[in-house]
Amino acid sequence: MPLHLEALTEQNSSEILTWILQEELQSINDAFVQSNKRYFLGTTPLVNQKTDKEIGKYVFTFFSNIEQQRNEILDLDITLNNDSQIELQFAKKLPQSSASNEYYEAVTVETEQHLIVETVNRYVIESEIEGKNVSVYVCAFPYELTVFDDERAFNKFCGFENAVEVANTGMFVHGLGTNFIAPGEVFNGKENDDEAPWSFVVGEVESFSDVTIAFGENKHEAYIIYLNTAIGTLPTLAGKEMFDMQGLSKGKIIGMNAYIKANFVKDKYPQK
């Protein structure tokens, strides 16, 4: 169950999971059932306690186990609302995928940049998506995040304090762009099949909102940062207890290792 709460809190995620299953499961207010009735989905709102407004959703995936004549919770996810779509090619399904969650190497259709995404509300599409172009709503849950004053400060951090010549070609590289994105394994040189795959993302802060997310009596302060990235506007959850957010403001550059969620539903499920 890829909640990725390391973006929000150091609290034991099993305690939060227990609360969600005890409380939010009873409050599902939107549902979708596949035509074969093997998989069905349900959501409840994720609310900003400061404003009492919805900022995302809890997403439940259920499996109808016909053989044992019971319904099972297959997956639980959290996603952030995003009004903007991005068209991605779901180029390659990754080996970490399972019935509960699918991971893909994806490619931005317009700019052909590669990244890793994990799916949310996958079962609203009843066919295979590998190799296909699909428009989705993205959001990010980072586990490492740094705020930089500007592009130059970011590239200095990356080792590009001065331009670097490429193999005596006379061509110089000045660093990474502010819309750079790549699979995380590009930087650590390996892919661990036991870990959820991630992406390295660079973006410019468009805006941000101050939120409080509560799991019962446990309240956590965070920002939802809206970044201008290679995959469009990317809502990003950043817990105040997890990251140094000093100096956060519009125009700052953020570099992060993050789990990118590709949601197939904007708001309500399609009605058949």
Image (cartoon, helix red, strand yellow):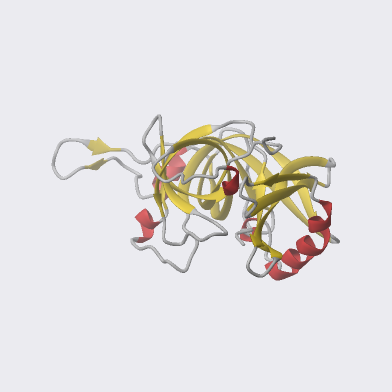
Q: Is residue 179 left or right of residue 143?
A: left
Counting from the top left corner in percent of width and height, residue 239 is at: 67, 54
Q: Nearer the viewer, residue 238 or 89?
A: 89
Q: Is residue 58 visible?
A: no
Compared to 271, does 33 lie above or below?
Answer: below
Residue at the image position 70 percent from the left and 70 percent from the top? 14
Q: Is residue 24 left or right of residue 129?
A: right
Residue at the image position 69 percent from the left and 58 percent from the top? 241
Q: Nearer the viewer, residue 40 or 77?
A: 40
Q: Is residue 205 visible?
A: yes
Q: Nearer the viewer, residue 122 or 173?
A: 122
Please count the marks in the image: 0
Counting from the top left corner in percent of width and height, residue 238 is at: 64, 50
In which quadrant is the C terminus drawn? Answer: top right
Counting from the top left corner in percent of width and height, residue 217 is at: 86, 61
In which quadrant is the N terminus drawn? Answer: bottom right
Q: Is residue 168 left or right of residue 111?
A: left
Q: Nearer the viewer, residue 174 or 90?
A: 90
Counting from the top left corner in percent of width and height, residue 27 is at: 83, 52
Residue at the image position 79 percent from the left and 46 percent from the top? 47
